[in-house]
Amino acid sequence: METVIITTTINVPDFLDGICKNMKKFHHNTNKNEIIVIADVKTPKEASSYCKKIMKKYGFKIHFFDIDFQNKFFKKKYKKLYSLFPLNDAIRKLLGSIYLFDNLPSRLIFVDDDNYICNDKDFLKGHLITNKSKNLKVVASKSKWPNLYKFFKERSDVPFYPRGYPWKHRNIEAKNFKIKNGTRKVIANCGYILGDPDIDASSRLFWPIETLKVKEKTHLALERDNFFPLNDQNTSLAKEYIPLYFKPMAGGRNSDIWTSYLIEKISFNFNETASYGPSFLKQIRNKHDYWKDYELEKQHNIATDLFADILNKIKIKNKKNKLDAFIELCESFINTLNQISKKNKVSKNEKTRHYQAISDKELTNRNFENIIYIRKYIIEYAVWLKEIKKIFKNKNVY
């Protein structure tokens, strides 16, 4: 199998018509490209018949997995992993990748159910770069955090950053980076989102961002040790990285962003990279309350600066096995957090100049909260990797 598109939805997935129509138009093989739809409790019964209708119309196989199928298949074969997936959560999208463990495709593409084909360009072609070595434009920044969103044309020319981008690096330096040509193997690619891009709730509250086009039409790859968020709403993953990809519930709404940083860290360790670029989708966003989203993202946003600092400093020794290197990365995270905890002495100073200021004690407590938040995320990820090691112990994947 070449490519599998995976989504989860609580709606009738009408966006699949556009994707299948686009793949058919550009003559992608119906025998080598499939779709998996993971239903949830709220998914209407009509969704199953709709998938059958689209499958018959275009010829691409669509697997529709309702809750009954999920309970029978995953509880029996992957009981431990299945227990990590609560109902009524978009994380269930990853059940699609677990289903592929016995026969991993060259790549998978995660797509959200509110993302639609927006032009006449070949959607799948833009992701075929994943799992291949290509001569690319490679981006490097002095800060190690280039903001690739600078290539978007925003309706009001408002500068903005992707969801989960470290707040300490949101400055003029973020858009000052160098681009050179280089050959890299791409292990993940995040496609462009027009209209309503993937940004923080705080950015949505500040200004109604609307992206009209992208000034850079080709893929941009990350230089070693340079990081940029890859969301999971229009992102492809290479075969070897499919089992490594997980979104711990402890990471909350932005769990996919921290996971993308970890995946990038592992890829750099093996002289590989992640890229950003075509394919294009347009987001017609499902209903959200931005204040609620803000609260859901708040702790993650505060902790991301510390997460990024730790990520930049860790050196991975394992150069042979990606799974073991990932386990080593998690262990290094925990060790570093423990060291920071010891140095983060509790302060009794609650005196401030006025009530709006922040005391030493408040700052210390915030640091402890960040440490706890990150540790929970890493520990949950380590549980996933431990199970992956058992499942793939006799398979030569990494």
Image (cartoon, helix red, strand yellow):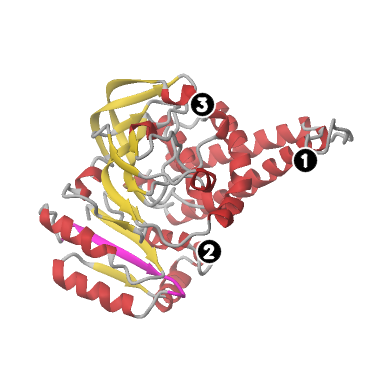
**Nearest-to-viewer mark from 2 and 1:** 1
Residues 347 and 246: in front is: 347
Whether residue 77 is visible to the viewer of this picture, yes or no, is yes
Q: Counting other residues with Cα less than 10 Å from the Cα at mark 3, is it few (<14), some (14-19), or many (20 or more)?
A: few
Look at mark 2 in the image and give the residue it sits on. Answer: 80
Q: Counting other residues with Cα less than 10 Å from the Cα at mark 2, is it few (<14), some (14-19), or many (20 or more)?
A: some
What secondary structure is found at the residue carrying circle 1?
helix
Label 1 or label 3, whichever comes before in sequence order? 3
Position above or below: 41 against 397: below
Q: Quadrant of residue 305?
A: top right
Label 2 or label 1, whichever comes before in sequence order? 2
| Residue 171 image label | 3
Where's residue 195, x and y in %? 34, 48
Which residues fall within the magenta stretch?
31-42
Where's residue 346, x and y in %? 84, 35
Position above or below: 123 against 39: above
Residue 137 in magenta stretch: no
